[in-house]
């Protein structure tokens, strides 16, 4: 992949469908920061909430681009 389309949110359908609300941008980096000032969710993630994420691999020179990724999830543990 030349770059990656990042989808992240607390709504499975939005991430799965790749809606504008879940799209967090296209980047060439292989890491993505969240929960810090100036990044996605600058006030942090909510304990007890499940978040979903998906990465699509983008290579404009490939016929099957973008290559859709699987939807994954994680939950922030409550203290």
Image: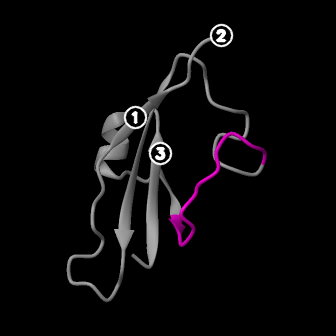
Image position of 53 (left or right of 43)? left
Q: Residue furthest left?
A: 63
In the image, residue 63 sits, relative to residue 4, either above or below, namely: below
Q: Secondary structure at mark 2?
A: loop
> What is the span of residues highlighted in magenta in the rendered image?
26-37
Image position of 45 (left or right of 49)? right
Name the residue located 35 percent from the left edge and 84 percent from the top edge: 60
Which residue has dot 3 on it? 8
Marks 3 and 2 sit apart, C-alpha to C-alpha, by 23 Å
Quadrant of the image occupied by residue 27: bottom right
Answer with mark 3 or mark 2, whichever residue precedes in sequence: 3
Q: Nearer the viewer, residue 8 or 19?
A: 8
Image position of 64 (left or right of 59)? left
Marks 1 and 2 sit apart, C-alpha to C-alpha, by 19 Å
Relative image position of residue 8 (x, y in whole percent)? 47, 45
Which residue has dot 2 on it? 79
């Amino acid at each position: 992949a030349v770059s990656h389309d990042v989808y992240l949110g607390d709504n499975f359908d939005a991430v799965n469908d790749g809606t504008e609300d879940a799209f967090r941008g296209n980047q060439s980096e292989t890491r993505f920061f969240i929960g810090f000032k100036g990044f996605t969710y600058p006030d942090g993630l909510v304990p007890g909430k499940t978040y979903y994420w998906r990465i699509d691999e983008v290579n404009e020179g490939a016929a099957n681009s973008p290559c859709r990724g699987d939807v994954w999830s994680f939950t922030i543990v409550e203290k």
